[in-house]
Amino acid sequence: MEDVADNATRDREYLLGSAADLSAEQLGLLAALLDRHTTACLEDVGVGLEDVGVGRRCLDLGAGGGSITRWLAERAGTVVAADLDVAHLGEGPGIRVLRHDINDGVPEGGPFDLIHTRLLLLHLARREEILHELAGALAPGGWLVVAEFGGPRQWVLAAPTKADEELFLRVQELAHAEAGRMGVSYTWADEVDGHMGAAGLVNVHSSRLSQTTAGGTIGCLLNRNYILQLGSLLIERTELTAEELARYCDLMLDPRFRALFYDFTITRGQRPGK
């Protein structure tokens, strides 16, 4: 039986875990914002091509709402979908759902022809070690695909008032500081490439997406979702007021507001062989 204190430590490590009240909305927004960029990378490494795709063994680590799991299952064969919370995942043809904490090691079912993980390792203290473990779980010729947000790099391009701009930046700064204290790394996205090379992977390649978001569109709705999840914590631990939190949330729905969103970096590397 796992120690209760150990479980509590792991729960704190996942600051925005999928068991949060706003999790379904969060996962849906992430899928809408990022899936097309993720699947483009997966297609680049051969997933979905008839001669190399079907029959692959895949691991979708931190599978969240399962949108990438389902995409893989339709094109690549067997997929292990692993997450701490599997409430938003469902079994299906070629899909095996597994409740699993990567801190306990790589899930069974390998070696894998493809391992995909998105917005997970940046939360984990053992991220570097885990990346090396994932690289070691690849079959010869297999690919590791790691996608992460980088930041904080958000700039306000337009806001209804100067006070709104200052409020946005202040709330973001407070949230990022709290996340940093909880162990989230905002430099990890830039470090993955080097760690893949150090793990012995070849054909390492990174791509970065930077885009704007306006009030009421996906990026701002995701900002709003994140801050609502952190809201009580921010009010408790900082000088942020409930009124300021409410104004921030309203601002994220206001089309007069525009800002650059977090950079999204996808890095892939291949195990030699085959």
Image: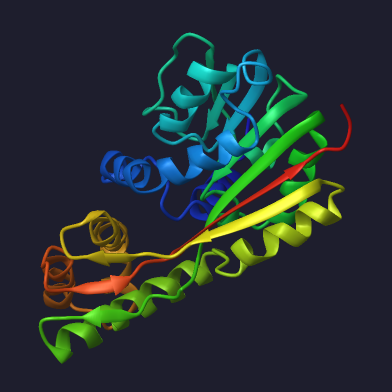
In this view, the residue farthest toward the bottom is 162
Q: Give the left or right position of residue 254, taking residue 133 as reference.
A: left
* Closest to the observer, 55 or 115: 55
Asked if residue 243 can be seen in this view, the reply is yes
259 is higher (above) or lower (below) than 13? below
Residue 210 in picture, x, y percent from top left: 43, 65
* Closest to the observer, 29 or 4: 29
Residue at the (58%, 57%) spot, across then down: 207
Residue at the (11%, 73%) spot, across then down: 256
Q: How many marks?
A: 0
Residue at the (74%, 55%) spot, across then down: 128
Residue 118 in picture, x, y percent from top left: 53, 45
* Closest to the observer, 40 or 22: 40
Image quadrant holding the N terminus, namely top right
Asked if residue 126 can be seen in this view, the reply is no
113 is higher (above) or lower (below) than 176? above
Image quadrant holding the C terminus, namely top right
Q: Give the left or right position of residue 119, taking residue 233 as reference.
A: right
Residue 122 in picture, x, y percent from top left: 58, 57
Residue 191 in picture, x, y percent from top left: 69, 64
Q: Give the left or right position of residue 64, taking residue 56 as reference.
A: left
Q: How is the image coloured?
A: rainbow
